Image (cartoon, helix red, strand yellow):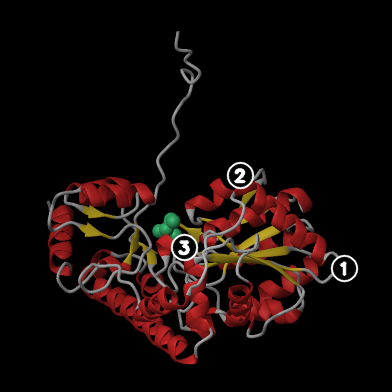
Amino acid sequence: MTHLFFEHVGSQPVDPVLEIGRMWAKDPNSEKINLGIGIYLDEKGRCPVLKAVKEAEENLIVNEVSKTYLPIEGEPHFLEETKKLLFLENAPLIAAAQTLGGTGALRVIADYLRLEWNHPIYVSDPTWANHHGVFKAAGLEVRTYPYYDRTTHTAKKGEFFDFLQRLEKGSIVLLHGCCHNPTGIDFTHSEWDFILDCCLKKGLLPLFDIAYLGLGDGIDEDRYAVNTFFKSGIEMCVAFSYSKTMDLYRERVGALMIVNHSHTLEAMQSTIRQIIRRNYSNPPAHGALVVQTILTDPKRKKLWLDELEEHRLRSCAMRKLIFAELGGWIQHKKEFQEAKGFFSYLGISKDAVLELRKESIYLLDDSRLNVLGVNSANIGRLKQVFSRLRHG
Ligand code: LMR
């Protein structure tokens, strides 16, 4: 007799980002438009492999001599290069590990915090939907801080600053290092300085999520926050991703860093090692070796930085094009134009989003769009469908 052990199981809601990508992929319409998931798309609607990455991979094919395991915390040179990229130095006093993308970094940090600093974590309202899921799954208490008004589509920075000053000591504050997802609204240098000051005075633990380095205002500007915080001597956590910054999405390559100025650095590193070992033992090598091969060779690094800058400029150009063609329908003109990185809300209702989906135009239910889904070939159709739906 077969025992039915799983008769009672229920299902979970679909992922609000990845589900839209799945729907888009399944859609047979040759004129479909993908404004959903945050990936770089070129003028032909493709997510290409960077030349710097191809070169590095060719080099690896010739020179890689073993497929033995990496250490539990990953490839040491990769970690050194990642520290230099973020902090401009191979910073000591940091516990670090190579992770399965930025999400993997967030999860290992969350698991660590749950064990050693189990305080509420505050995320922006709104934030990347998976932040809630990852932190809750690790057992952290997730609360929100005011960030953006979804009715008027304006930032609530003043409210956030007041809120920050009232937070209880020890709270963890999740900050988007650049290119806020989903709003595209970032802080200025002086606002970051103010946030740093609050964190220092109030004893708050910042956790940076940086997934779009170089794609906002350029690499130096985009690392301003994380680098300034680091230089101040504050203890903090960083979850970094190479998915967008090197187009290495499916290679799942990221890193976590925890700055620790006490005598417990080795103990911290040992716990991080244990969390990883018990989850997936040790990370995959390919993506990290690609990154390392690029960052340790000045010519390849320059090629990558040039390609990254091209990506950034294309996202700015597409934002301008969208505004030029659809700006009449966008109420929050200033916020939309000034937003950084891939995302903004379009500011339309869920019903309107669903109407667009019937026309094979895919954005997230909350009207977040990835500006890179637009190109000179599809903007005309987008405008046409928009005006038909608005007037029809
Ligand atoms: C996004 O927000 O679209 C990206 O970060 C992809 C993802 O994993 O959700």
Q: Is residue 207 visible?
A: yes
Residue 251: percent from left, percent from top: 44, 63
- Looking at the rendered structure, the secondary structure element under dot 1 is loop
State which quadrant residue 369 falls in: bottom left
**Depicted 229 relative to depicted 237: above or below:** below
CB of mark 2 near ligand 1 (< 8 Å): no
Above or below: residue 291 compared with residue 284: below
Q: Looking at the picture, how far across and down is residue 371, in whole percent?
A: 31, 68
Furthest residue to the top?
A: 1
Q: Residue at x 17, y 63 (%)?
A: 382
| Count of marks placed on residues | 3
**Mark 1 or 2, closer to the camera:** 1
Task: Identify the residue position indicated by label 3 in the image.
Answer: 181
Describe residue 251's horizontal placement relative to residue 266 as left or right. Answer: left
- Say which label, 2 or 3, has the lower sequence index: 2
Tag in front: 3 or 1:
1
Q: Which residue is mark 1?
A: 263
Instruction: Tell me if label 3 and label 1 are in contact, CB under 8 Å.
Output: no
Question: Which residue is at the front of the view, 345 or 103?
Answer: 103
Q: Is residue 16 above or below residue 38?
A: above
Q: Amino acid at mark 2?
A: Lys
Q: Position of residue 360 (x, y in %)?
A: 19, 52
Residue placed under numbered mark 2 in the picture: 136
Q: Classify mark 3 as within 8 Å of ligand 1 or not, answering yes or no.
A: yes
